[in-house]
């Protein structure tokens, strides 16, 4: 991905670039890297609610935890998603 190779300076571009890396990890099956990076990115996304990446990452995490049969993490993620939606 060309955009991942660019030297991005502003915070918004860095967040979008990180999101693309997370999506790539998810699609390529790099499960632990995906989970770690997605959980690190979510708090940073709160600054830019207009990016609408939050919902997409929550959906990926929910699917990931469902496939892993990790119910405690699934419930936590769903709870965080509900809290996020209530703040909108």
Image: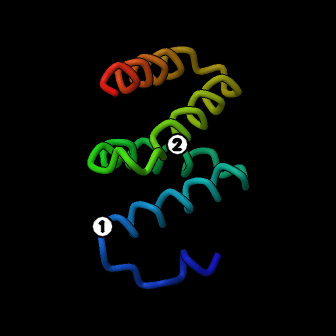
The quadrant of the image that shows the N terminus is bottom right
Marks 2 and 1 sit apart, C-alpha to C-alpha, by 21 Å
Which SS class for mark 2? Answer: helix
Determine the residue positioned at 55% across, 54% down: 22
With 29 as the anchor, is 54 left or right in this view? left
Q: How many numbered marks, from 0 up?
A: 2
Residue 73 x/y as whole percent: 49, 22
Determine the residue positioned at 48% across, 66% down: 17
In the rendered image, which quarter is residue 64 located in?
A: top right
Residue 55 x/y as whole percent: 50, 36
Say how the picture is coloured. Answer: rainbow
Determine the residue positioned at 30% across, 67% down: 11
The correct choice, above or below, for 77 with respect to 18 in the image is above
The circle drawn on residue 11 is 1
The quadrant of the image that shows the C terminus is top left
Residue 44 x/y as whole percent: 31, 49
With 23 as the anchor, is 55 left or right in this view? left
Give the residue at mark 2. Answer: 35
Sooner in the amino-acid sequence: mark 2 or mark 1: 1
From the viewer's side, name the closer residue of 5 and 72.
5
Please name which of the two marks, 2 or 1, marks the residue nearer to the observer: 1
With 76 as the anchor, is 57 left or right in this view? right
Which SS class for mark 1? Answer: helix
Residue at the farthest left position? 47
């Amino acid at each position: 991905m060309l955009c991942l190779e660019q030297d991005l300076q502003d915070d918004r571009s860095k967040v979008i670039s990180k999101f693309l890396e997370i999506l790539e990890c998810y699609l390529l099956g790099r499960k632990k890297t995906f989970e770690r990076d997605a959980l690190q990115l979510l708090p940073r996304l709160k600054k830019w609610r207009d990016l609408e990446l939050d919902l997409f990452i929550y959906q990926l995490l929910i699917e990931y935890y469902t496939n892993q049969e990790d119910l405690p993490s699934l419930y936590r993620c769903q709870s965080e998603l509900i809290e996020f939606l209530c703040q909108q």
